[in-house]
Amino acid sequence: MSENTNRPANAKPMVLLISTAPSFSPARLAMALANYGFVPAAVCPSRHTLHKTGAVKWIFSYNYLAPLRSIRSAILVAKPDLLIPCDDWAASSLHELHSREARTPNTSTFVAQLIEKSLGSPLSFPLAHERATLLKLAQSEGLRVPQIEALFSLDDLKKWERDVGFPAVLKADSTSGGEGVRIVRTLSEAERAFRDLQRPPMLVKALKRTWFDQDMALLWPALRRTHRTVNIQAFIAGRDATSAVACWKGKVLASLHFEVLNRQDASGPSTVLRHIENEEMSATAEKLTERLDLSGLHGFDFILESGANHGHLIEMNPRATQVGHLALGPGRDLPAALFAAVTGRQIQPAPPVTDKDTIALFPQEWLQNPSSKYLRDAYHDVPWQEPEFVLACLARRRKPGVWRSIQKWAQVFSKSLQAK
């Protein structure tokens, strides 16, 4: 379902969030963008938490069987000032849509131009999905990256064993959330992981995830029987870290840098982070943003080497990440920086949401462990001003025995909300 906005020329800028997977962070980002004067709209599945926040003014249905058509239709109806992909599949869809629009004769150029305005140079689009190519480009710019090679056969693994050795990390292109990552310690482990990561996703698994989880990241690769490119990286002993930037025409406007303290699982999304300042991470993000002529919201993942604390770039995310809504003061407020870039008006960033360095993301850390020490000791990032969203997040927990009933605890939180 969609609604024609028919906005006057002097209306507030509209941002269209595109989310194809079940995630909490797009709704959090929409809230932050609305606080600065954006009018958020969204393209998303029917059960997405974007439906649970009053910050989103228009919602357009996302069609799993015609993803590009549904995104294009929303763009043409809403005519937004900015597009923000909120997951890897959304970013891939915008890249593919741009390619189609750019090569189709006798059609409006509005969609292609808006994608370029929102994401940056289309020359950077392929690099977002080719890890080895991106890291080799970063290396050519003098940036610190782990040794990496694309794998095409088992012979490439044997050569890696001779030249570099194990342990190592195998990663499949066009995967996210840690699903396409394997740490291997022997050649036999590497060979098994290579076969597993290279083959197309099982159709039954892809259909189950699409139908029950409303996550179609595996659907089209499974239907097309696409064999994925697998890369091998040298293993760097250290701590996970991540950067999120708001940028415009190749210039970083605001940035956030974090060390990851806890994850959903061993290689999944982060749930607790510690805000840090790291010159090498900052310089890497700025250099690649300029080199690739990026715009919008992007993320960069690192390994902070044990002892030396060097930041090794391991991946770029061509989309908004789950920390993008956090306002931590001047130069660390991504929504404020985007608003200034789109409107040309300087605005005062919001005060920092906390003076604590450690942040527990809601509901991610709570869903993982309701008894987590971080919920007591860190800043727990609960948007109390959005009770419907909070209650929808609480209802996602489906583990009998943790509490007697979800309804009972929803009532407890509802009382807490009223007391705020």
Image (cartoon, rainbow, N blue to C red):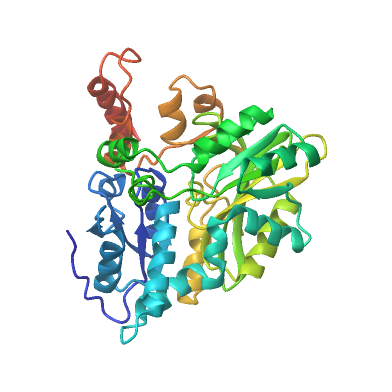
The residue closer to the viewer here, 204 or 210, is 204
Q: In terms of depth relative to the viewer, which is nearer, 126 or 227?
A: 227
Between residue 59 and residue 57, name the one nearer to us. 59
Q: Residue at x 37, y 71 (%)?
A: 13
Quarter of the picture containing the C terminus is: top left
Extreme residue toward the bottom, this view: 106
One can see residue 178 in this view: no
Q: Quadrant of the N terminus?
A: bottom left
Which residue of the protein is positioned furthest toward the right in this rendering? 308
Closer to the camera, 12 or 238? 238
| Residue 25: image location, x then y, percent | 42, 46
Residue 343: image quadrant is bottom left
- Does 405 appear above or below 19? above
Image-based side of 100 in relation to 234, left or right = left
Residue 82, given in percent of the width and then of the height, sits at 40, 69
- Image coords of residue 203 (percent x, y): 32, 40
Q: Position of residue 188 (x, y in %)?
A: 64, 28
Q: Is residue 406 above or below residue 271?
A: above
Residue at image position (50%, 48%) is: 228
Which image quarter: residue 267? top right
Residue displayed at 63% across by 33% down: 190
Q: Is residue 370 above or below residue 247?
A: above
Tally the numbered discs: 0
Q: Is residue 360 positioned above or below 76 on the image?
A: above
Q: Is residue 243 visible?
A: yes
Residue 386 found in image quarter: top left
